[in-house]
Image: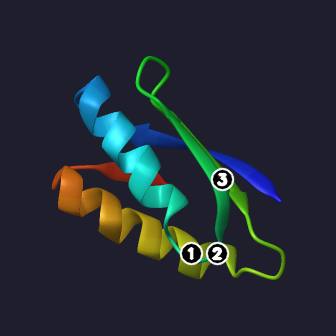
Amino acid sequence: MTKTYKIEVDCANCANLMENATRKTAGVASATVNYMTQKMTVEFSEGADVQTVMQAVLKVCKKIEPDCQIAF
């Protein structure tokens, strides 16, 4: 399953770091973060609980940029 979320990220470098951190999160098969459109697309692993995975994604993204927001 693939979902797209609105994300608030301040710079392209942070978006790249968030993308890499999201890809390493359990339950994520692949991810992209587009700084220009302020969107994150996440493909979830089969059987993953979307809400739980997105909570973990938000946590790792906040380590990179503390004021990051993901609308999910």
What kind of element bears circle 3?
Answer: strand
Left or right of residue 40, residue 10 in this image: left
Where residue 70 sits in the image (x, y, percent)?
43, 52
Quick check: 72 above or below 27? above
Q: Are marks 1 and 2 in contact (CB under 8 Å)?
A: yes
Q: State the residue position of label 1.
A: 53
Mark 3 or 1: the one toward you: 3
Q: State the residue position of label 3.
A: 30
Where residue 1 sits in the image (x, y, percent)?
83, 60
Question: Which residue is nearer to you in this view: 64 or 66?
Answer: 64
What kind of element bears circle 2?
Answer: loop
The disc label shown at residue 27, or none: 2
Tell me what residue is drawn at x 50 percent, y 70 percent: 25
CA neighbours of label 2 inside 10 A, class few (<14), some (14 to 19), many (20+): many
Question: What is the quadrant of the C terminus in the image?
Answer: bottom right
Q: CA distance from mark 3 to mark 1?
A: 12 Å
Q: Are marks 3 and 2 in contact (CB under 8 Å)?
A: no
Tell me what residue is drawn at x 76 percent, y 70 percent: 45
Tell me what residue is drawn at x 32 percent, y 57 percent: 61
Q: Amino acid at mark 1?
A: Val
State the image quarter where residue 41 is shown. top right
Left or right of residue 66, residue 27 in this image: right
